[in-house]
Image: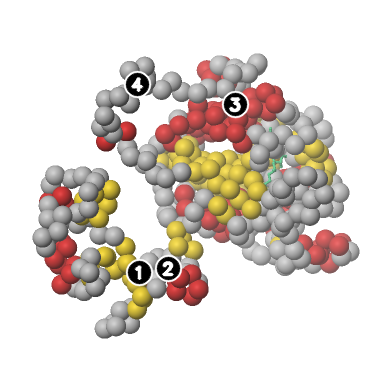
């Protein structure tokens, strides 16, 4: 679709005016059975949690238990409520599947579907909005099953105007489907912020020689600098300085100069304007002034474990650590709190640690907690190692990422199984 003209600039010819066009557009909402009132959700009884390892004052916290009552507990904690700078969640996707780890241990179930699933996630998202700082961001990772419904729910909770991107991620290599459809290789990340003023460290990719030569085709004779030519005008009529003639030329109809005539003179004096043989000015944009290629909303380089070289924990549906690295650097600063309440194998938590952020993670799967502890104590392993015998796996070097004083592990009570046995088991992973 071609770019349109802003409706405030549309003058029309009278005949195309539709008097029935409403002046405001009511928001779209999703209706389903069992949709609870926000106030009722926010009065969820908070969890009782107890620390079983580490110090309450630690900067990083991992919680074992259902995230909803734990979120309700965080809401009452003034050092957390409204203080979380970045949330990334990768919840179950409503796949109606159960997941096992690579070593065939039960990991988690993903059996909720339809309205039950939407309401499950909506309740958590309402708490997450409350925990988010005013300049915070939330990224929700989903696939085609539920992404469309959850987009409407997130518009309701965070406000449509706080929607930033629908990111498409290539999740795996091409599939050789026998069924009659296109190969399904993408999933989606919905990016919202709490407000208009949010932390944003624009991510860029370095230029490759090939891309730089394609984009910046010209070389300035005097300096040897590579540059491209871009228009000197922009859409929209202006009546101030930038709408006036420059060197006897008016900007093209419907446009204005990007700079005042005085600035254009100064740029020309510095040699920053290219004049075509028929006298059209263009602005020179230099490659050496570009920080890189701004990252767009289609991500092709963050497939999950797909070959023998990628290092993983073996937890199912574990996400690519480089993708979390991009998200965390873009939407937080060192020292900020990064939060993941569907933490799984701890990818968000480990990358947050590496980037000097504090983190809080929650998961209700003992296998997820075990995997996260092992990951912090011993690191990840190349995917191929999972086919070798277990003694090889025990000999992993301690990466030194994990310092016991930095970290507290909490359990949510009451726990129906034998929690003490579980604790002994987990502690074993930290030795
Ligand atoms: C898709 S996995 C997350 C994987 C993670 N991003 C990673 O890189 O390893 C979803 C996780 O959500 C957890 N989960 C599901 N329901 C939960 C709940 N109500 N409370 C806490 N965790 C939950 C599951 O145990 C599972 O580990």
Q: Nearer the viewer, residue 205 or 214?
A: 214
**Dot label at residue 123:** 3
Disc 2 + disc 3, Cβ < 8 Å: no
Q: Secondary structure at mark 4?
A: loop
Q: Residues within 10 Å of mark 2 (few under 14, many from 20)?
A: some
Disc 1 + disc 2, Cβ < 8 Å: yes
CB at mark 3 closer than 8 A to ligand 1? no
Q: Which quarter shows the C terminus?
A: bottom right
How far is mark 2 from mark 3, CA to CA? 46 Å
Q: Nearer the viewer, residue 275 or 258?
A: 275
How far is mark 3 from mark 1, CA to CA? 50 Å
Q: Percent x, y for residue 8?
A: 28, 33
Q: Nearer the viewer, residue 281 or 315?
A: 281
* Left or right: 353, with 21 as reference point: right
Q: Closer to the N terminus: mark 4 or mark 3?
A: 4
Can you see residue 47? Answer: no
Residue at 43% of width from left, 65% of height from top? Answer: 292
In the rendered image, which residue does mark 1 sit on? 228
- Name the image quarter holding residue 62: top right
In the rendered image, which residue does mark 4 sit on? 18
Q: Secondary structure at mark 1?
A: strand
In the rendered image, which residue does mark 2 sit on? 215
Q: Closer to the N terminus: mark 1 or mark 2?
A: 2
For marks 2 and 3, give the one nearer the viewer. 2
Q: Residues within 10 Å of mark 4 (few under 14, many from 20)?
A: few
Q: Nearer the viewer, residue 100 or 307?
A: 307
How far is mark 1 from mark 2, CA to CA? 7 Å
């Amino acid at each position: 679709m071609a770019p349109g003209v802003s409706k405030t600039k549309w003058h029309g010819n009278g005949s195309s005016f539709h008097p029935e066009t409403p002046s405001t557009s009511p928001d779209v909402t999703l209706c389903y059975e069992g949709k609870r009132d926000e106030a009722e959700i926010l009065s969820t009884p908070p969890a009782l949690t107890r620390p079983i390892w580490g110090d309450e004052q630690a900067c990083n916290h991992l919680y074992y238990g259902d995230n909803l009552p734990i979120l309700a507990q965080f809401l009452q904690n003034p050092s957390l409520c409204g203080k979380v700078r970045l949330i990334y969640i990768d919840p179950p996707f409503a796949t109606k599947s159960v997941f096992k780890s690579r070593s065939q241990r039960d990991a988690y179930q993903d059996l909720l579907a339809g309205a039950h699933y939407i309401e499950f996630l909506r309740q958590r998202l309402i708490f997450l909005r409350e925990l988010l700082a005013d300049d915070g961001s939330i990224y929700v990772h989903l696939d085609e099953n539920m992404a469309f419904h959850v987009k409407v729910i997130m518009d309701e909770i965070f406000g449509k105007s706080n929607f930033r991107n629908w990111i498409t991620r290539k999740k795996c290599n091409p599939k050789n489907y026998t069924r009659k459809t296109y190969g399904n290789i993408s999933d989606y990340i919905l990016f919202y912020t709490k407000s208009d003023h949010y932390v944003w460290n624009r991510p860029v990719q370095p230029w490759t020689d090939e891309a730089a030569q394609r984009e910046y085709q010209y070389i300035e004779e005097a300096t040897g600098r590579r540059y491209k030519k871009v228009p000197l005008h922009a859409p929209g009529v202006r009546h101030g300085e930038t709408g006036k003639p420059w060197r006897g030329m008016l900007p093209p109809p419907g446009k204005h100069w990007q700079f005042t005539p005085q600035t254009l003179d100064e740029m020309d004096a510095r040699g920053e304007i290219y004049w075509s043989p028929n006298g059209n000015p263009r602005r020179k944009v230099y490659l050496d002034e570009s920080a890189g290629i701004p990252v767009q909303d289609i991500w092709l380089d963050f497939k999950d474990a797909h070959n023998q070289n990628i290092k993983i924990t073996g937890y199912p549906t574990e996400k690519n650590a480089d993708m979390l690295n991009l998200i965390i650097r873009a939407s937080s600063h060192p020292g900020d709190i990064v939060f993941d309440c569907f933490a799984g194998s701890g990818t968000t938590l480990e990358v947050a640690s590496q980037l000097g952020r504090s983190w809080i993670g929650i998961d209700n799967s003992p296998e997820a907690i075990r995997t996260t502890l092992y990951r912090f104590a011993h690191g990840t392993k190349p995917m191929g190692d999972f086919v070798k015998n277990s003694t090889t796996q025990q000999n992993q070097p301690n990466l030194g990422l994990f310092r016991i004083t930095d970290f507290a592990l909490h359990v949510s009570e009451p726990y129906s199984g034998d929690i003490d046995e579980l604790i002994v088991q987990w502690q074993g992973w930290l030795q």
